[in-house]
Each structure stands twice: as C-alpha cells, then as structure tokens.
Image (spheres, rainbow, N blue to C red):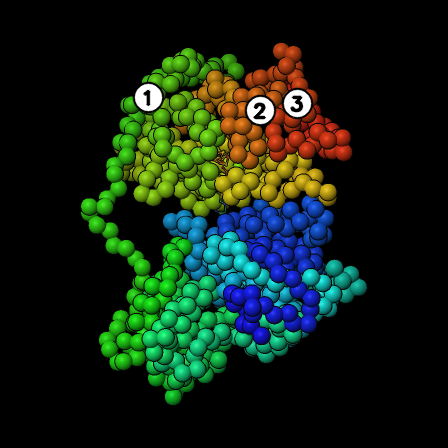
Amino acid sequence: MTTGTLIPPEAMTTGTARQRLAFHSGNEAAALAARDVGFHVMGYFPITPSTEVAENLSRMQADGEHEIVMVAGDGEHGAAGICYGAALGGGRVLNATSSQGLLYALEQLPVQAGTRVPMVLNLAARAVSGPLDIRGDHSDLYYALNTGWIVLCARDPQAVYDLNFAAVRIGEHPDVRLPVIVAYDGFVTSHQKRRIQVFDDLGPIRAFLGERPAFPTPLDLEHPATFGPYMNDPDLINNKVQLSQAMEAARRVIPAVLAELAGLTGRGYPMVDAYRMDDAEAALVLLNSAAETAKETVDRLRTNGEQVGVLSLNVLRPFPAEELRRVLRPVRAATIGDRADSYGAGGGNLSLEVRAAIQLDPGNRTRVLSRVYGLGGKDFYAADAARFFADALAAARGEAVDTFAYHGATPGSADRAPRPGLPLLTSAEVSRGMTHVTRDESTGRLAVELEPLWKMTEVPSRIAPGHGACPGCGILPTLHQVYRALEGDVVVLFQTGCAMVVTTGYPNTAHRVNYVHNLFQNGAATLSGLVEVYHERVRRGELPASNDVTFLMVSGDGGMDIGMGAALGAAHRNHKMMIVEYDNQGYMNTGAQLSYSTPLGHRTSTSEIGSKGRGKRYHHKDTAQIFAACGLPYVFTASEGYPEDLMRKVAKAQWYSKHEGLVYGKILSFCPLNWKTTDDAAQPVLQAAVDSCFFPLYEIEHGKTAITYDPDAIGRRHPISDWLGTMGKTRHLLAPANADVVRGIQDEADRRWKRLKAMHASPDL
Ligand SMILES: Cc1ncc(C[n+]2csc(CCOP(=O)(O)OP(=O)(O)O)c2C)c(N)n1
Ligand code: SF4
Ligand SMILES: [Mg+2]
C-alpha cells in the first residue's frame, strides 16, 4: 500500500476497485471526485487558485457528465449560505474557495459546525490580504482551525481526489456530523498535474459512500423543527461540548473510514504521515506539499549518515496529538515549519500545537524550533529543507539555535530601490477646463460643454503607460476618457479586478494620483469613510478647505456583485462620491467566470456550452436601474465607443458628486480576450451592443430619465443577433437550436428598452 503521496509508476496500486491512471492537477482531482461523488449542489464564488474546481465542473456539466446543481453565489458569504441551506436540506454539498474567499465565508463556518450540518469544502490554500498576494501559503487555512470543521490535508492531487471521498463519509458519520475541509496548496498542488489513479467503475465508491444519512431537515414537513434557535447561557456551552465530542468521535471514525477507502484504492492515509522516522534524531514537521520536498532531502541526508525524518499531518482537525507524541518521543529536535504566522505567539499554529501536544508527555525532551516560511507563495526547495534540518541537527547536538525565526525573508538594501516612475500629477496639470458644467435652473438639469475630442487628448492621463492589460483591452480607454473629463484633485479607489491588477504591482504603480485598493467587496464602504473623514477634517481645520477633491471608485461588474451591499449602503447614505463600473460582462481577472451582468446564453468559464450546456441561464442584472431606485442625484450608462457622450456624463457626475451626493455610472467596456474577438474589434462590437439596444445609453438626473442615444430615431436599430454574431463567446447562440435563447435576450432587451422609452417620454415615471 502507498501512503497517498507521489506515485511512481511501479508503485501504482489497485485496491479492490477498478482504477485507471490519469494525469490531473489538484483542482481537476477535486472536480473529478465531486463528479464521482455526485453531490446535489455546489455553491461557489470564483477566487484564485480554487476557481478551476467550479470551472472544471461547469465544463463537465455542459457535456452531461454530472447533474450537480451549480449555484454561483454573489460572493463567498452568499456561496457559504447557499451551501448551508442546501446541506440543511439534506443534500450532499460542495464548495471550493481560497484566501479572502474563506475569510469572507468564515462566519458561516462555525454556524455550520455548531448546527452539525456536514458538507465538503475544498480549500486551495492561499495567502490572505493585505497586501493582496494570489499565491499559496496557509494563512487562510489557519483561520479555519477554530471553526469546528474537520480539516484533512492533501499533499498532492492524488490525496485531493481520495480525501474528497473520505470527507463525505467522515462528515456524515452519525457520531461526527460535521463539515469537512480538504486543504491543499494553492498552485503547487491546485495547478500542477500529477499522475493519479481515478475510479474506472463508480460502483464500489458509490457503495462506499452509501446514501447520505437522514439528519433533521427543514424539508421534513412531517416533523417541523426549529433550526438555529436563539441560544444563550447555560445552553451554548453544552452545544460546544457536543461539538467537541463530535471531534473526539472523529478521531475514531477517520482512521476507520480511511482504512475502508484504502481497501478500495490501495492508498492509505494515516493521521500522521511519518517518513523515515523510525530512528530519526532530528525531524521536520510540515504541512502539505513542502513535506514532499523535504522527503527528498531526508533521502540525501540519510546517505550521509544523518538520522532524519519528516512528519506531515493528513488530518489537522482533530489534531493528531497522540500520534505526534508517540512519534516525537525519541526525537531530539524538530523544526516545525509554519506557512503562516500567529503574530506575536512565537510560532504559527502548527508549531504551537505540536509543542502543546508533546508538553503532555513527561518523558518528552524534543527541542522544538518554529520557522515561518513560504509566505505568499515563496517556493520551498530542497535547500530550504536542508536548512531546517541543519537547525534541527544543531539543536539535537545541544547547540544554541533560534527557537523562532522567519525563513526566507529578504531584507531590502538601498542600492536595490525601485527606479522612480513618472511623477505624481498636480491638480493644475490636469485641470485644463475641458468641460464646462452649468445648471439650467428651469429644468434643474446640468448642461455640459465639451472641448473637442482632439483637445481632450492634451490632458495628461492620471494613469501612466506601462500597465499590464491585454492588447485591445477596453479598461484603459474607458479610464482615460473618465479621467480626461475630471477636473482637479481625484482620490481613486479601485475594487479588485483587471483594472486594479494591471495598474499596480509592487513596487510599481501606474497611478499618478492618490490610489487605494481594499477588499473586493468593501470598496464603496471604504471610500465613503474616506469621504466623510475628508469633510470632517476640513471642518476641523486639519485639511485645507480650498482643496477640491473628487472621490472616485472604479469597479468591475463583478465588484458590483460581491460589493453590491456595500455600494447600495453608500448609495442610500448618499456620500459625495462617484462609483464608475466598467462592465465587461464577467469576472475577467480570474479567468472569465460568469457575473450577474453576463447576459443570458453567453459562454463563460462557469457557464460552459456543450451537449447540455447553453451558456448562462439567467438574464443580466440591470445595475443602473437598481441604483436609480436609490434615488441618487445622477445615474448614467455609457460606452467607451461613445467618448463624447461618456465624457459629458462624467463631467455631470463629477459636479453632482461634489454638490449633491453619490452618482453611479455603468460603462460597457471591451474585453477581447474573453469576448473572444480580435484585439481591434472594440468599435464594431460595442456599436452593435448599443445599436441593438442591448446596452442603451441614458442618464437619470434627479429621477428623470433621458435616453442620450436612440438607435430607433436614426434608423440604426439592429436585432440582437447582429451583436451576438460579433463575438466568439456568443456565436454558438446563432445555431438554430439556440433560437429560443436569442429570442429570450431580444425580448428582455426590448422590454427594458420600451420601459426606458416610456420613462424618457414621461419623466415623472
Ligand atoms: C472575497 C474575494 N472573493 C473573490 C476574489 C477573487 N476575485 C478577484 S477579482 C475577481 C473578479 C473581478 O471581476 P470584475 O469586478 O468584473 O472585474 P474584471 O476582472 O472583470 O475587470 C474575483 C472573483 C477576491 N479577490 N476576493
Ligand atoms: S482579461 Fe479582458 S478586461 Fe482583463 S485585461 Fe484582458 S482584455 Fe482587459
Ligand atoms: Mg468584469
């Protein structure tokens, strides 16, 4: 039997179930396992590096390979809620997330465990913000350790596949009834393909899984019950005792389930994987992929006569304290590597818990060294393992070694300072009087005079060249147009997305004005705080009153899904700020997943097309109308293809944001990469979107709607199919079999257009 690690071909085992050799990454393995489990529901929200789990399942679903109901949440908080509801309803439920996604979902996790509702969450572990880093460490995983979830650790794609089946059975065991995390390393495991064995015949694994036991559910209408009652002292502690007992039961259940699974697969997963530990004097204790690297170092050191070994935990919750005590007893010194710090505690969770475990053994004399390593995706090489062993061996010899240290940090040096970029722009340099806004007192509306477009190009851009966007990307032209119409000082806040990622990358920035980035979902709240403190500090005389600052938030359409609550909050409070959404109809930065602004039938990486998949299943969100319902002073739509119209609206928006309150604008923005067009196709594609009335251009001033471009009036109205034919992501819709989808998009566009026309004709509507 192998121990669920890298499998050399000669060691491939069969177990009793028929398996076949495949070549997959950890994310693919998680998706394959999900298909083979046949979960009822997956609730998810995309985040690197776990997004591929949902993407792979979407592709398989489009090809009719499974029937899991895939629900894209409005954010991870929503996704976790979807999962909780589905699991409470008696379904087998799956989620996959990483980093901020886990943190945003975190408050759902103790509820799920405290009410004892099993499900499976794949965590492709990644560093948590801030600053934002998309690569792997265990700082997200460590946050989950106090939530009451069982945590299984998968060191490689094979383990990801195997442990997903185990997770279902362990969590659903009647003595356990807890949700389970399967944690694997972001990128190293989530993305690297390895040789793995997968079931070739689902019979045995489905028999292993059995039916989900019937736990109490609000769908049992014969036995009404209250789920989640308000519970104070003295009852809450009893609830937690039961949770603790369930964890203890899991200590018993986990080895039994893993042994049963091993019978099918030929691969075993002891609670603690001990590599060449029999006579080890010095050891490393590491989680996940780093342990595999360290094994190679063990082999090399052993040839030099060093008695060394590696321990790695296959199960992190419940913590295998007894197993560690036993195996560490004869070890003189151990270096425990933590891929996340518990700041100020003298070590990360793993080293603190190993120390606590061996402290209960009066016969234990192991010296423990804590090393924080590999943060933010810093690779862990054999040389790093060798360094850890050198420290442990020195400690074993009784030499003085730092008990706690960071490993791999690179102190800066003055001669390696970044080259200075373009200087920041002053207000005077960008205030060129390109827009003249006046108020028509009779109508209450603003009139804007614009200098000719060629003159506008004289305004230096607040975004310097040197960004990293794809050729032809519409974001930069959109932002240049917005900026050229703005006068004076601007403080910008970008939500997470392509615009943010392509314009900053430490130590460089393309922003020549003050720029802030905060969490994906929280931009509007953050900017509203900045606006309020600005005005308050001016009032107190702490900042000059003469400063004339415009506060601008730039968000993608995805930011207006996950950040909708914060944005509506800011809108209802009517802070003096602008929200500009560049709508490229998907989560492009994370690989073109569907957003709620993706139109019906459009192909994205989570609304795949195939024999069973016909693209996105519901209509695009009418975000402008949602903001209009907040009674804002000004709402507009625009397209980067109509620069004069766009800049006129931005000038109005700036005026309103300074004088009256929050304005919102939605700008259709070209994404050649994911709309699957040539790089130079922005003009015809955007023109077709506007001329087909899919994306009408209008503004709402003090509640009064005015269409600013009417294709009907100038005989340019085209059917929606003309627009759909311009993009690779929609060309499938022109097949006769999808005529009903095209009709659906056309009907919805017509309905929204008619409504706008009616509001335009009767401003009181
Ligand atoms: C809480 C949280 N969940 C998920 C992500 C991952 N994420 C970063 S950007 C992004 C998509 C952004 O889409 P959009 O706002 O439309 O901007 P675009 O990339 O299309 O420009 C996602 C899902 C994150 N950073 N934080
Ligand atoms: S993926 Fe699309 S939106 Fe993002 S940089 Fe490339 S073209 Fe622009
Ligand atoms: Mg987008």
Q: Are marks 1 and 3 in contact (CB under 8 Å)?
A: no
> Badge 2 is on which residue?
685
Q: CA distance from mark 2 to mark 3?
A: 9 Å
Give the numbered dot on residue 431: 1
Residue 425, can we see it? yes
Badge 1 element: loop
Look at the numbered disc 1 and say if its residue's Cβ is closer than 8 Å to ligand 1. no
Which residue is pictured at 40% across the width and 55% down the height?
377
Residue 382 falls in image quadrant? bottom left
**Residue 307's x, y, as percent?**
36, 79
Residue type at numbered disc 2: Val
Residue count near mark 3 (Cα–Cα under 10 Å), binned few <14, some 14–19, many ≥20: some
Residue 204 falls in image quadrant? bottom right
Badge 2 element: helix
> Badge 3 is on which residue?
722
Q: Which residue is at the far right?
A: 222
Which residue is pictured at 35% across the width and 73% down the height?
301
Q: CA distance from mark 1 to mark 3?
A: 41 Å
Residue 495 falls in image quadrant? top left
In the displayed structure, would residue 88 be above or below residue 488? below
User: Which quarter of the rendered picture does the C terminus lie within?
Assistant: top right
Residue count near mark 2 (Cα–Cα under 10 Å), binned few <14, some 14–19, many ≥20: many
Front disc: 2 or 1: 2
